[in-house]
Image: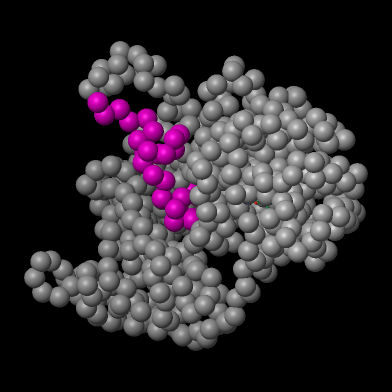
Amino acid sequence: MHPNYVRIFDTSLRDGEQAPGASMTSAEKLEVARTLARLGVDVIEAGFPAASPDDLAAVQAIAAEVGQTPVEGRPQAEPPIICGLARCTRGDIETAWQGVKGAKRPRIHTFLATSDIHLKHKLRLSRPEVVARATEMVAFARSLCADVEFSPEDAGRSDPLFLYEVLEAVIKAGATTLNIPDTVGYTLPDEYGAMIAGVIAHTPGAKDVIISTHCHDDLGLAVANTLAGLRAGARQAEVTLNGIGERAGNASLEELVMAIRTRGEKVGLHTGIDTPQLCRASKLVSRVTSYPVPPNKAIVGANAFAHESGIHQDGMIKNAQTYEIMRPEDVGATQTTLVLGKHSGRNAVSKRLGELGYPLEGEALARAFAEFKKLADRKKAVHDADLIALASDERTAPPELWVLQDLQVVCGTTGLPTATVRLRGPDGKSHVHSAVGTGPVDAAYKAIDQLVATPVQLLEFVINAVTEGIDALGTVSVRVRHDDQRSCHGHGADTDIIVASAKAYLAAVNLVLSREPAAPVHAQKSAVPAEVPVS
Ligand code: KIV
Ligand code: ZN
């Protein structure tokens, strides 16, 4: 590997998923992992297997599929490394190994805090006890897996001398990557760079392992700190798509990669990321986590390449370099292409979906094509973004226990907003109900609640237009919670936003029901294992 190659370690599925309410289903995680592999990510942190049986199953599924298959046309000849997180305990490490061992290149990532604040108030361990536990657990992880990463949590606020001591011990115990987390996003770029330089200079054995950055964005400095760490000698960067993550999030993959690419001559580094796929990957993560991308977000925001002022537009017409430091196509932010219409056939749709990275087959293709036809009847032009919205729904669709058959709403400035909903139930029969609400969406949700008879609390409702124009396809993402269970997401796409809203709600409710023991129509509540907090 070239000495200036930066390994991109994506933790959207682990640290990213720790963002409040960003939990993903196993199908969604697999979809994100496939996208990360196509993007050229070197390491995918697929999850925290000890957190719950669902997390373990998702990591195993990713290891078995994405961790086994090299992606055609990518510079990396091997499939990505699949990594699972573990606290420094035998149980966690064994479970992480169960999660990743099906991958061709598995990695166990274990962590233990090293700052005095964490030692005193959280771990209640002395420094020698921390050294002993980290050494023992890294050696144990190494007895299972040849690739072991160790993170001294809260390194950013740790005594550097103690940090070197712990790191030296875990290198001797077999760690192959040392990750240096600024867990609380406290450091400034010069401090973080100096910390990485200090680790490399003062830790015996550090030059024989990979040093990694892991920066949080509490002060908005995560990407700047990561770059400073890389320039000081780190060669792995831990990042997430859209910068999602605990609290203010992690360093954003797309921002870091484009900074390295755009200022390559200055920083002298490079990555293996196929940057034209960035916007698509960002959209997928935004959709499955229901975290909208702000329009002014660097690289992937809707306005990242929009020029509003007359002076800027004039400059752009004369030469795009006047106001653009990157080409939109380099990050996949090209204008949406008009590709298909109502006369397009199934083969054309299937071919275009494949080109867009959403190959569908069999019944999934049949369903997506049927949706495409309905859309093409209502919308003059079907754009790539529309197709992606339809295909994404298909690829991450929850089980269809209740299916929307019909929806009619009456609303306006006078009268009571009323919705009549007809659903096909798990019993195969049609069920109809009408309800009054504060608006058409509320009325539709109340009618669905009555039919499904599984009370859920609506936690989030996000609506977006996929393309521009009055006939744009609207996508709705909702997050609901049933009793004390983990929250469930649902997505719906339609040219009618009330219909999209009903589809999204029903998808979330179906997911709630599918997590419960089966019952003919109305399912019973089940206990979901508690989530394990990690910082
Ligand atoms: O921020 C952090 O310290 C972490 C570790 C678990 C690596 O996410
Ligand atoms: Zn973190």
Which quadrant is home to the N terminus? top right
Q: Is residue 394 magenta?
A: no
Q: Position of residue 409 (x, y in %)?
A: 20, 70
Count of labels in the image: 0
- The image shows residue 149, relative to residue 228, as above or below, that is below
- The image shows residue 109, relative to residue 478, as above or below, that is above
Asked whether 306 or 173 is in front, the reply is 173
Write the start and end of the magenta stretch as one range.
284-309
Q: How is the image coloured?
A: one colour
Q: Residue at x 71, y 34 (%)?
A: 196
Q: Position of residue 66 (x, y in %)?
A: 67, 49
Q: Position of residue 149 (x, y in %)?
A: 77, 47
Residue 2 seen from this side? yes
Q: In this rendering, would 392 be left or right of 528?
A: left
Q: Residue at x 35, y 35 (%)?
A: 303
Question: Residue 191's image quarter?
Answer: top right
Q: Residue at x 46, y 50 (%)?
A: 286
Asked whether 137 or 358 is in front, the reply is 137
- The image shows residue 113, relative to residue 165, as above or below, that is below
Q: Main secondary structure of the magenta part?
A: loop
Question: Residue 294's image quarter?
Answer: top left
Asked whether 328 or 378 is in front, the reply is 328
Which quadrant is home to the C terminus? bottom right
- The image shows residue 322, relative to residue 206, as above or below, that is above
Q: Position of residue 218 (x, y in %)?
A: 52, 46
Question: Residue 341's image quarter?
Answer: top left
Residue 141 seen from this side? no
Asked whether 368 or 160 is in front, the reply is 160
